[in-house]
Amino acid sequence: MAPAPPAPQLLMLTLLLIWLPSPQVVWANSPRWQWTCDSGLCVRSEAPSDPRLDAELEETVVQRSAHRLRPPWPSHELCRLTCGPYGALWPRPTGHSLIADALVPFSPATVRFDLSAVAGEQGRELVDAASRRWVRDLQHALAGGGGHGGGGAGAGAAAGAGTDVLVTVLTRDRPQALSWETDETYTLDVASNGHEVRVTVSAQTVWGALHGLTSLRQLVGCCGEGGAALLVAEARIADGPVYTHRGLLLDTARNFLPVETMMATMDAMAASKLNVLHWHATDSQSFPLLLPRVPQLARWGAFSARETYSAQQVSALLSYARARGIRLLLELDAPAHSGQGWQWGEAAGLGALALCVGQQPWRRLCIQPPCGQLNPANPRLLGVLADVYRDVVDLWPPGQPLHMGGDEVSYSCWNSSAEVLEYMSKRRWDRSQDGFLRLWAEFQQAALEALDAARGSSDVPAILWSSHLTRPGNIERFLNSSRYVIETWVEGGDPLPQQLLALGYRLVVATKDAWYLDHGFWGSTRYHDWKAVYSNRLPGSMAQGVLGGEVASWGELVDDQSLDARVWPRAAALAERLWSNPGTSAREAEPRLHAHRARLVAAGVRAEALAPRYCVLNEGACH
Amino acid sequence: MSRQRLLWRLLGAALALTVVGLAAPPLFRLLVSPHGTANSVTGRRVYSSDPGPWTWRCESGRCVRALWQGGPQVSLDTCQWTCAAWEAPLWPRPTGALRLANSSAALPADLDVRLRLSNPQHEDTRDLLAAATERLARHLQLVRPAWADRVACDSARGATVARLTVLVRLDADGSRPTGHLTLDTDEGYRLQVRRESQDLQAEIDARSFFGARHALETLSQLAWWDPVSGCVRMLDSAIVKDAPKFRHRGLMVDTARNFIPLEALQRTVDAMASNKLNTLHWHLTDSTSFPYLSRALPTMARYGAYSPEQVYSMDDVSRLAEFARERGVRLVVELDVPAHAAAGWPTEQVSCSEQRGSAANAPLVQQHRQNENENGPQYRLEDRRERRAQHGGEEGPAWWELCGQPPCGQLPPADEAAFGTLRTLYQELRQASGASDVAHLGGDEVSAECWGGVRGERLWSLWGGFMRRAHRELVAASQGNPPTAVLVWSSELTAPHNLRRYFDPSTHVVQVWGGSKWNETLPVLLAGFRAVVSHVDAWYLDCGWGDFRSGGAGPCGPVATWQTVYSHRPWAAFPSGARSRLLGGEACLWSEKVDDQTLDVRLWPRAAALAERLWSDPPAGVHPDLPPPGSPQRDEPTLRRAYQRLSHHRERLVARGVRAEAMWPRYCHLNPGACF
């Protein structure tokens, strides 16, 4: 091939020589695609081949920092940034959202942050750390962290070139603990003026400000001259979540997940404005929490000594979560889903702490091997639980609810224990469903009291899964609506959520046939794709008592090898449902979710592809 | 108060246990620095190599976890390897005699692995064997987990060897190369391992490089990590006689819906080699993209690739083919024509490439991949024009009126320029991929609508004529070395009324991809043709994840679990004559919703399940070679007996850098038999 290219394409050639595996092939004659925004969709066309126009276009692409870049766009990514009211934002803002169709180049390393108007020293520390992450993550993504096409060889090397960017962050309140009441709203303004871009993130709380920075990240694309980052030149966004509980459940009991994997997941959650990591830490299969007061639980219950979480690691997870505006919601499932880890009671002189542990054939005694259920007839169990709760209270910030599990209790297990039956007959409870229900409710009440005692407070609500105990006819007998939030995991058409709302209970919703991410791989379940996740509506508003929802990644068939693929981008689809609760369909959302998926991938998250890349590059062509 | 005291006492007891553990390894092992001194910085128990409070006992051929109460502690892997030969975690299971000792030797980190040939061999064979031996050595290194790299091997526990000598005896003419895989290649081998003091010797008998390579693969599987001794161990005496039941054991990967980088394809080939799969079917191009950067026709990739860096050059193809050959895998490149072709082709060489995205839902998208339809193949596209009218049509047809998946595009039935292009591409790809005896013409899902609504005989003759002509171009491009097994996808053209009219049983092989309940495979075989099975409801690994289109009929599904993949055995009832023409099978990974990010988790361990199905083909019910009469496992279904071995193999794949999915809760792995 002739190596001499036409002069105007020198830049392109230089890049291609770096990229191409076969250096003798020159892409000088390749078509240049361009994208323009038409009715909210980016449309691809072939750029004009007239050399005069070519030169003009080239100048547009490589022009100097002072100038804004305008459409037509040389890559789909840049078109998406500015197309439609929401550009590439995910989740989409709930207030106004204006994004100009112009970009300015800048170098992430030179972005300055003015944090003098952030309330409180802690607040400044949080925003300072977030701003450093912002720069680092952007540099990582620009350096080719896995993105497609138009990638920037030598990105970030555009020292000196580009516009000055000054980000001013204002918050009014000193940082408080995250809760269901936290104000997460923010406004984000981007204004360009000659050689300077002024960004203002304004929020009531530091947590809102972190969301503002996340949105700012989503106004940046790649790449201008020398790999410079490109920022939307003008934007005005006002935003805040519809629901305050936006969660992802990770199960570390069926299969262990390393701390680093959980941290990486939290990064992706923060990038999607999810704010609750529901940690289903223990189950009948394993007890990986290495608790200072009761190390026996992990010693007996962990798969191996490596597959544990030490107190230090839990603390590290907690601070990692807080730094990202995420609550780490611990679940210690009880009395069912407890087996491995509880076997040592008899040898220690405490009697049987759990029953049916690992018993076979398991189908008689539980729903999933290995069986195991706490022994409510053993008063010493509560002493052990009290120590477990003390460790939890020591580790977690004050006021954080504990998820106490409470699902899938097997009466047949208790019914097989002479000790339990004797206890029940002493209490004059018969072996009917009602008798076992009373036994269960008594255990739940005692466990809550032990937790309250460990905390020294009985004001913090606890969370329970919906169950036999929470049926409309039972729940008011046993569970006080001021003390319990119920996480419903029924199917979409089930009336339970409305019934519980009518009874005054607050809910977290985990719709089984839409938000259970493990479905599709066992039994007769079917996989719920991102559109099913996105399209699932909540059964009521915040005002009606729905705090939000969760997608659940149950861990039977998932460990860190495939966690990302199971969770992303479907958890992001949930994030927009809960943050924005849009009235529009998945089709409207799709181009933005493609962009968000690409951002996650660039950040190192192994998110699934949603469609052939053809459909990404040709918005609307695959409907 | 008393409760409090009791708990303190308990905690004290736990601490005392810890202290005892320090004195009496290996309850809690100390981290040992490379210089052999105990790490006293922390003084705390170090969990990284703690085998825990458990030991495993071999009971009636199954390893049972029990609390360790003194005596020798046995790790699960050590138990699994020494308990019973039929439970030994070899994958795929050898088909011939299998004799495994219950003793092992520790392999040092600096194990000296040597290759010796007992008879002179062609230079190419020698190079290939040397590369395969290097791969063996690398895999033996990977047996030790990365986190355990500072754990010292306690050599006091049993024998340690210093050398592993691989002695290869090829029953082949040493003057000729044996490294060209054909459908006639003998892939069988015999492997014998024995130890003489510090020397571990592996004797391999085979008839080709490929058999010897499989033996090395088996050899690499005989090693495991033992957390109790902190050593990598290997069985020190074994005899394995083995050969595959099927000669075509394939995996198809689509790089056109989404691009998959060359390194990811290499990683996939590497994992295939670990499973003795031998064919990578590369669905290189489709209507969505044309990532092949032809030397003669680079414009096709310029227009058809997703981006300049998402291409494969001719050198890339050569590199992958050679990488695959070293691993016993043949590369079969498919340029799908005449349908599934649009991107990259000159507009005038593509029919119906102009179509709009539909604003309305596409109500009746092609049902081809809908396996829930059990009535048989429905190759005729619905007449969708009426439906457009019903949907208040815009100008021009929507994609769903013209083809099964956007974007549409199909080469015209007889366009000389297009055939010339094909010949050029075939030439380059045959040259680059090593001129295998197996080739693939594509040939599926031709849309009558796209060719202007031709129907019946007219359609078949145009389509059949195209396939014949494409075949001629392939032969011409092969320069005197034409492929002897030319695959085509099953279609209306391969139905009994058309098959012999357009295809030749001595050359063509039908890759059957319809639903497994369709009566499609046996008629092909009975017509005298060879076949490769890829039933959509069992071996399409992309099915079940939902449709990328927002409208249209449901995609194929549900997800084929590894159990489904493993249990699929459609040939069980075939007459033996027909069965003998079945070359094997392929699992297919179409990439609509897959790219490099999730490639591994889609493929593994399901493709491993396929590998054992095609290599060993264990029958359902009782396997004569397996547990001896009286063993409790003897009456277990074949599938159940695969769980534990596959779970170990999955860990092996992960250790080798493959992101294979978990198969069950880890509890089940640690407690063999407890989760059924």
Image: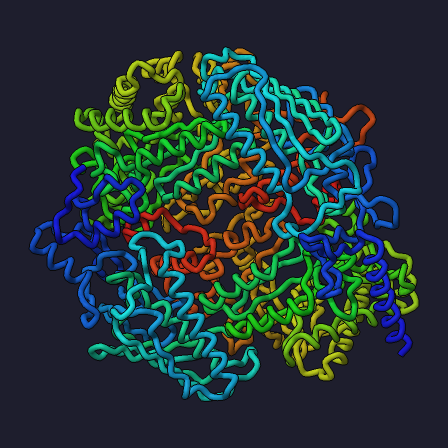
Up the image or down, B180 lies above or below A206; here it is: above
Q: Is residue A498 above or below residue A3?
A: below
- Residue A313 in the image: x percent, y percent? 64, 67
Q: Residue at x 35, y 36 (%)?
A: B316
Q: Give residue B488's position: percent from left, percent from top.
A: 37, 24
Residue occupying image coordinates x 41% and y 70%: A134
Which image quarter: residue B297? top left
Please state if B479 lies on the left or on the right of A397 as rendered: left
Where residue B647 appears, as percent x and y from the top left, is: 65, 40
Quadrant of the snapshot with the N terminus of chain B:
bottom right
Given residues A95 and B383, the one toward you in this image is A95
Please say whether residue B443 is visible from this viewpoint. Answer: no
Towards the viewer: B626 or A222: A222
Quarter of image, res B396: top left
What colouring does the structure picture have? rainbow
In percent of width and height, residue B187 lies at 54, 20
- At x 77%, y 36%, the residue is B159
Residue A412, placed above or below residue B589: below
Using the rendered view, name the quadrant where residue A229 is placed. Answer: bottom left
Left/right placement of residue B187 relative to residue A69 reads right
Residue B268 or residue B448, whichever sits in front = B268
Residue at the image position 37 percent from the left and 51 percent from the top: B550
Q: Is residue B68 visible to the viewer in this orientation of the structure? A: yes
Marks counted in the figure total 0
Q: Nearer the viewer, residue A392 or A306?
A: A306
**For the C terminus of chain B, which image quadrant?**
top right
